Amino acid sequence: MRNNIKIHPKLHIQKLEEIYKEPITIRVNKFDEEAFEEFSDDFEEAINTEQPVIPIVIDSYGGSSYGVIGMINLIETSPVPIATILLSKAMSAGAILFSFGTEGYRFMHPDASMMIHDVASMTGGKVEDIKADTKNMDEMNQRIYQRMSLHLGHKSDYLGNLIKEHNHVDWYLTAKDAKKHKIANHLKLPTYNIEIDLRVTFG
């Protein structure tokens, strides 16, 4: 994503930062606890700038389900639109985060791809522990798929049914596939256009 900045020629500005702070772009490639803390700090800073849109650039193979749930919970508190931008890949948690961009603000490069799959369990140990963890993962899967489906304007069981049709294996989507299922809105990358003008009126 580019920032195009146009300054009126009569404004003799030596350093742009003297009068203007560029919008904050949040970049995500991991979903562990450290990544969530960094995301939270960047998100709060972006909100405080009062910028009209918060861009989130995603390039990730995925990560913790709890990390991405925390991120989307924060996104849903935003007073301004969230633009999710996919340059290359958004797998697993990355695809979930991408889908929670504001409607009309989800941008995906035509050559990018994403992958959606069930939440993975890493629990070992006693049989009863594994059973409890499996139940928890199944419930988390259902909640995430339902939230994604509703946010994308589908019925709550839309994505869950598609995952079943794909036999719960990794579901890879091209950019065209993502747009077909309303996950992506635009198959292009956006540009932040910034104009600093000089206006003089007399009345």
Image (cartoon, grey):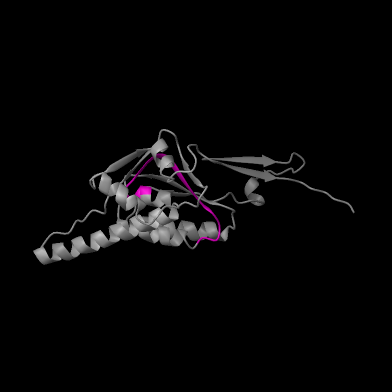
188 over 105 or under it: above or below: above
Residue beneath the point at 42% across and 62% down: 73
Q: Is residue 93 magenta?
A: yes
Q: In which image quadrant can residue 141 be found? A: bottom left
Residue 10 lies, in percent from the top left, at: 77, 41
Residue 59 lies, in percent from the top left, at: 39, 43
Residue 139 lies, in percent from the top left, at: 27, 62
Q: In which image quadrant can residue 51 be found? A: bottom right
192 over 110 or under it: above or below: below
Residue beneath the point at 53% across and 40% down: 190
Q: Is residue 22 left or right of residue 71?
A: right
Give the residues in magenta: 78-95
| Residue at the left extreme, as displayed | 126
Q: Is residue 202 left or right of residue 51?
A: right
Q: Looking at the figure, which quarter contains the C terminus?
A: bottom right
**Would residue 126 be seen by someone viewing this image from the given angle?**
no
Judging depth in this view, the residue of 152 and 82 nearest the camera is 152
**Would residue 145 be seen by someone viewing this image from the given angle?**
yes
Residue beneath the point at 59% across and 58% down: 50
Judging depth in this view, the residue of 16 and 74 nearest the camera is 74
| Residue at the right extreme, as displayed | 203
Residue 33 lies, in percent from the top left, at: 33, 59
Q: Is residue 66 magenta?
A: no
- How many numbered marks, from 0 up? 0
Judging depth in this view, the residue of 118 and 55 nearest the camera is 118
Judging depth in this view, the residue of 62 and 107 nearest the camera is 107
